[in-house]
Structure formats: structure tokens, C-alpha cells
Image (spheres, grey):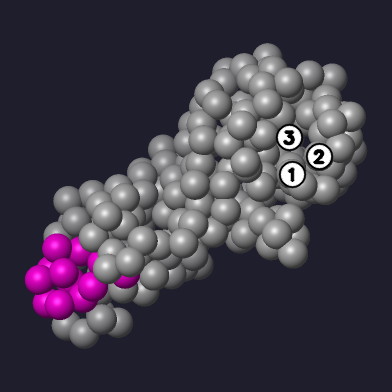
């Protein structure tokens, strides 16, 4: 099996959320001489990007399945990175949490898995995060992007969510140095909601989040 053959096998394994099979594919690739760098950049990242295209109807995949696929990709990436010949360059740094008043966590964990698998450093702030903490932690960790998850309309639109985070960034003259991305059910129902609450962008799922965060990081570092 050549290098190109491992990606389809890994894709099949993660679509089936078969962690054991996925790890067997990676182990076989390494044994055949595929480098850890190739595992991450030629297998894991392309497969994560291809996953939804592989499904006939992506909506049929449950949140738990999305989480498992992101988790498998993250586990493989975290195992490979220490084995790189030279330390990999992180593509960006994100602090991420669930808005104040919101205790949902699964969606945020899915996003983090995809970001980490795409070589983004993530700082998890947990749930019910006050707006001041989003900004303070972003500054403390020199983050490029703040990610705010909200699964309820009132936490997405509320005064203690993204609206207040944006206000704090403006007050501290950080508006151009730190970008905001939001996600969660309210934004899927109203794709223009992110503009109303003052975010720079929104993402529907982990794959699009990795792409959008990359674009926001590029804007910050331009």
C-alpha cells in the first residue's frame, strides 16, 4: 500500500468511528516508512477535510460521531507531533469557551479536536465563561482568535456573550489584534446572527472552523 492508499483506509475508519481500525491504519503506515509528518499532513488533515464529502448526508452524523472523528484525528496528531524531525510550526492560537449562561460542551469539544488536528493551539476555557475572562485569557495566551460557543439563542444574543466580548476588545484597543469566531445552533438557524453580535465570522462545524480560524489568523498576522 503506497502513501495515497492509507488516507482512504483512515477515512473509512473515522467515518465508521472505529478508533482501533484507524490506529491500525496509522501503525501500518509508520511501519511501511511513512513519516510522522506525512501522517499528519498527508493523511489526517486531508481526511478530516474530506470526511463530510464522504457522507451521503452529513446531517445523518450525530454530534457524538462528529466528536469521535475529531477525537481520533486529535489523538493521532498529538502522538505524531513529538516525533517530527523538526518542531512543527503552529498555525495559530485560539482561546475557546462556551458563553456565560450556557453549559453545553460537546460542540466546543468537536471544534477543538478539529482545530488541534489542523495544528492550531487551543486553550479550553470551559463553559459559562464571563466575557471578561475571554478577553483576559486571550491576552494572557497571546491568542489570535477568541472562539465563543452558544447553543441557546439567549446566550448567543445576550449582553454577556459575544456582544460584550467585542465591546471589551474595543475598549482595550484590541479590536484589530484579536478576532472573534462564534458557533452553535443559533448561528445555523440564522447565518447572519454573527454580524449582529459583533463576531468576525462563524463556523457551522469543525472542518469549516479550522478553515475560518486559519483565515482570521492570517488577517491578524498580516
Which residue appears at 51% of the width and 35% of the height?
A: 123
Residue that appears at 19% across and 65% down: 25
Q: Is residue 28 magenta?
A: yes
In the rendered structure, the answer to whether residue 142 lies left or right of residue 222 reads: left
Task: Tell me if I can see residue 153 in this picture.
Answer: no
- Of helix, strand and loop, which one carries label 1? loop
Q: Is residue 196 above or below residue 85?
A: above
Q: Up-down: is 160 above or below 195?
A: above
Label 1 belongs to which residue? 178
Q: Whole-Å distance between the Cαs marked 2 and 1?
A: 6 Å
Task: Give the residue at x 67% y 39%.
Answer: 146
The disc label shown at residue 50, or none: none
- In the rendered structure, are the residues bearing label 2 and label 1 in contact, judged by CB atoms less than 8 Å apart? yes
Image location (x, y in percent) of residue 41: 39, 70
Dividing the image into 4 quarters, which one contains the C terminus?
bottom right
Which secondary structure, mark 3? Answer: helix
Query: Which residues, given as a range, are shown in magenta?
Result: 26-37
> What x and y, as percent, mark residue 196?
89, 38
Among the 4 quarters of the image, the one containing residue 212: bottom right
Q: Quick one: label 3, few (<14), some, or many (20+) residues within 10 Å?
A: many
**What main secondary structure does the magenta stretch of the protein show?**
helix
Write down the residue under mark 2.
Answer: 174
Disc 1/disc 3 C-alpha distance (Å): 23 Å
Residue at which label 3 appears: 186
Residue 61 counted in the magenta span: no
Q: CA distance from mark 2 to mark 3?
A: 26 Å
Q: Secondary structure at mark 2?
A: loop
Select label 2 or label 3 by which is in front. 2
Amino acid at each position: 500500500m503506497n502513501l495515497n492508499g492509507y488516507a482512504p483506509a483512515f477515512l473509512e475508519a473515522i467515518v465508521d468511528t472505529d478508533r482501533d481500525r484507524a490506529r491500525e491504519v496509522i501503525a501500518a503506515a509508520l511501519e511501511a516508512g511513512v513519516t510522522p509528518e506525512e501522517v499528519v499532513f498527508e493523511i489526517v488533515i486531508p481526511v478530516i477535510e474530506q470526511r463530510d464529502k464522504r457522507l451521503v448526508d452529513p446531517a445523518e452524523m450525530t454530534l457524538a460521531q462528529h466528536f469521535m472523528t475529531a477525537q481520533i484525528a486529535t489523538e493521532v496528531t498529538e502522538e505524531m507531533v513529538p516525533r517530527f524531525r523538526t518542531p512543527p510550526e503552529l498555525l495559530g492560537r485560539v482561546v475557546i469557551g462556551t458563553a456565560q449562561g450556557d453549559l453545553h460542551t460537546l460542540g466546543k469539544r468537536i471544534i477543538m479536536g478539529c482545530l488541534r488536528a489542523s495544528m492550531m493551539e487551543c486553550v479550553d476555557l470551559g463553559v459559562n465563561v464571563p466575557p471578561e475572562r475571554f478577553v483576559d485569557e486571550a491576552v494572557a495566551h497571546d491568542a489570535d482568535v477568541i472562539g465563543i460557543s452558544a447553543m441557546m439563542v439567549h446566550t448567543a444574543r445576550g449582553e454577556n456573550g459575544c456582544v460584550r466580548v467585542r465591546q471589551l476588545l474595543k475598549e482595550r484597543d484590541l479590536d484589530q489584534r484579536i478576532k472573534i469566531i462564534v458557533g452553535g445552533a443559533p448561528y445555523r438557524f440564522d447565518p447572519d446572527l454573527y454580524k449582529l453580535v459583533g463576531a468576525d465570522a462563524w463556523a457551522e462545524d469543525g472542518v469549516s472552523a479550522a478553515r475560518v480560524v486559519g483565515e482570521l489568523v492570517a488577517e491578524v498576522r498580516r
